[in-house]
Image (cartoon, helix red, strand yellow):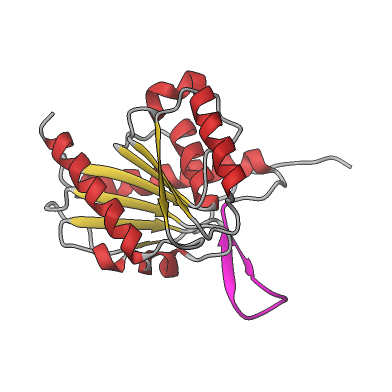
Amino acid sequence: MIKCNITTSKQARYFLSQKPHAQIDEVWIVLHGYGQLANSFLNWFNPIFSKNKLFISPEGLHRFYWQGFNGKVAASWMTKEDRLDDIKDYVIYLNNILEHIKPQLSENTFYHLLGFSQGAATACRWLDLGSIELHSLTLWGGTFPDDIDYFNKMNIFNKLNTKVFIGNEDVFLNETFVNNEIKRFNDHKLDVKIHHYKGGHKVDSKTLEKLNKLIQKEIKTFKTT
């Protein structure tokens, strides 16, 4: 048996909260988790939509039926099968989205990247491998993947005011896991702020408003430097 690869074009979709325009000076790129779709994930951010703020919700390139052969359709960013090729593909895809939208916005736009669950690892790999410059990073219900050389990437991650949001009822991130992650952050000298909230594995509106206030403070600093 001989394994072969070929590069082929593919239609990929993403959703926007509004049409891009020159008055927009704040962008949130939000990456969904495993088993979600980009349009339904974008709806979670409805409470903080505004005219000067653009939300970009890309969808993972792998869609599938959640159960069986019909019914609910879901998407994912990658699996363990040919994982390096999948990572390369979604990095190029995410680069292309931002390169397409950026010229339509203000030159002084603030870019915030949020990854939820599997999207958290996707966000980190994009920052590691992509040709992008962002200003802020939030990992929600997820954390840094192990396959990044953080010691040599500290100049990227430590300037992003990285925030990790973890719910006290999150079935995937228990207290032991969180404590181990804090140790790992310290070992890698990653400057990360942990934010705990009451709730499960979801972006809830109350905590989202807290994050929004943190981002507005970051934007004020960004505009004065």
Q: Nearer the viewer, residue 48 or 181?
A: 181
Q: Is residue 1 magenta?
A: no
Q: Does 106 sit left or right of 87 as displayed? A: left
Image location (x, y in percent) of residue 35 = 58, 64
Q: Nearer the viewer, residue 208 or 98?
A: 208
Q: Is residue 65 magenta?
A: yes
Q: Residue at x 61, y 43 (%)?
A: 176
Query: From the viewer's perspective, is residue 72 above or below residue 93?
Result: below
Q: Residue at x 49, y 66 (%)?
A: 37
Q: Residue at x 39, y 64 (%)?
A: 204
Q: How many marks?
A: 0
Residue 43, by quadrant, is bottom left
Image quadrant where one finds the N terminus: top right
Q: Does 210 sit left or right of 61 as displayed? A: left
Query: From the viewer's perspective, is residue 191 above or below residue 53?
Result: above
Image location (x, y in percent) of residue 168 = 50, 56
Q: Residue at x 72, y 76 (%)?
A: 68
| Stretch in magenta | 63-77
Image quadrant where one finds the C terminus: top left
- Asked whether residue 63 is in view, the answer is yes
Query: From the viewer's perspective, is residue 170 above or below residue 86?
Result: below
